[in-house]
Image (spheres, grey):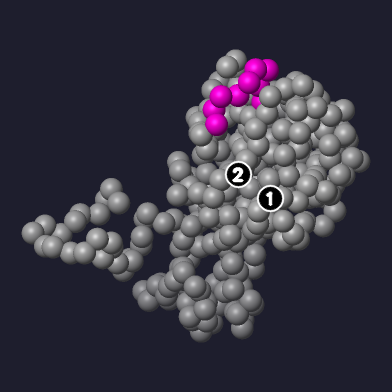
Amino acid sequence: MGEVYEVTIWARGVTQDMEGRHLSLLIANSADKDGKFVQAWDDYADLPDRVQVPLRKYARISDEDLEMRYDYENDHPNMSVIMDDTIVKGINVLRGMPKGGVLVVNTKRSPEEILKFIPNKDLLDAIVCVDANSIAGAVDLDFMGSEGGVETVSVGAGISAPIVGAAAKATDRLTLESLVAVAANKDGVKKGYETAQVKSL
Amino acid sequence: MSDFKFPEGKEVPRGAVLPAPVKENRMMITGNWRTDRPVIDHEKCTLCLNCFIYCPDACWHLDEEEEKMVWNADFCKGCLICAVECPAFALTAVNELEFEDGVVRLEKPF
C-alpha cells in the first residue's frame, strides 16, 4: 500500500449530514474517475441525528490498493474540510494532520479571519475559503437521504459542489474536469473553483 | 469517566452510578454546536427570567448581586429559544465568529 491522501470533512448534524456525505462521495468518485483507488464513508460515532452537532465524513485517495478497510477514522488527514465556519471554534480541526496540510472552509469571511481561530496553523500549507452558501443558493435544509446513504442521483446538488471545487484549487489530488463530471451542480463546482480565496502559508 | 471517583467500599449495579449534573458536566460540553449566540442588552432586560425558564440547558442564570442575567458559553447550543421568548427583545442572535471568546475547542468530539 502506497501513500494515502486522507480527507476529513467536518459538517453540522442533520442539516449538513447529506451534504457532507455528498462531499466525500464527490472526492472519491472524481478520484476514481482519474484512476485512483478510493474510499468514502461516514461513521455513526458523532451522533449525526442531533441538530448542529459537529460530525465527520471521510475520504481516502491512493495510487495503490487501499488496505485500510477497518480504520473508521482518518488519523492523519492531509486535508480538512469545514462545511460550517463556526466549527473552528469548537473543534481542533487539524488534529493529527501532518505538516503541509490543506484547510478548506465554507465561509463568507476572509482566510485571515479564519486563521485567527486556528491555533496550530503552522501545520498548514494553504487555506482555502469559499462562500458556498451563496453560490449554491439557499442553505440546504432538505433531509432527503440523511439516513442510509443509498441515494446517488443528485450527489453534489447543494453546497458540496462549490466546496469541492474550491478544494481542487489547493491540491493536485483532485481535478476539476472529473469533479464537474461527477457533480450534479456543474456550474457550482466551477464557480467554487473560480471564487475560492487561496492563501498559502 | 476520568474525573469521576467511584464510591469506595460500596457495591452498586453496573451503570447505576453517574455523576449528577448538579453544577456543570464537563464531560458533555455542547458549546461547539453553536453557530449563533444570544447577546443580551442589559438596558432592555427586565429580569423577567423567561430565558432562565425556557433554556433547555440552563445556560441563563440571575446574578443576584449584579442584578443581571449571566450566560454560559460552554453549554449553550445556540438554539436561540431565549431570543424568541424574550418579551423585552433584549436578546439578539450574532454569529459566533464575531467574538474572540467562547472557544470550547475539544480534542475529540465525543
Residue A22 shown left or right of residue B29 in the figure: right
Q: Which mark is residue A93?
A: none
* Residue at image mark 1: A149
Q: Looking at this view, name the residue that lies furthest to the top.
A: A2
Q: Chain of mark 1?
A: A
State which quadrant residue B14 falls in: bottom left
Q: Residue at x 20, y 54 (%)?
A: B5
In this rendering, does residue A26 appear at all? yes
Vertical position of residue B25 compared to residue B70: above or below: above
Mark 1 and mark 2 in contact? Answer it, CB < 8 Å. Answer: yes
* Residue at image mark 2: A42
Q: Nearer the viewer, residue A135 or A172?
A: A172
Vertical position of residue B24 compared to residue A137: above or below: below
Residue at disc 1, secondary structure:
loop
Q: Residue at x 61, y 28 (%)?
A: A6
Q: Residue at x 78, y 47 (%)?
A: A152
Look at the magenta stretch and give its main secondary structure: loop
Dot placed on the residue nearer the N-terminal end, 1 or 2: 2
Vertical position of residue A136 compared to residue A34: above or below: below
Q: Position of residue B32 (x, y in %)?
A: 53, 53
| Mark 1 surroundings: few (<14), some (14-19) or many (≥20) residues within 10 A | few
Residue A160 shown left or right of residue B53 in the figure: right
Q: Which residues are magenta?
A: A61-69
In this rendering, does residue B101 appear at all? no
Q: Position of residue A180 (x, y in %)?
A: 87, 34
Q: Chain of mark 2?
A: A
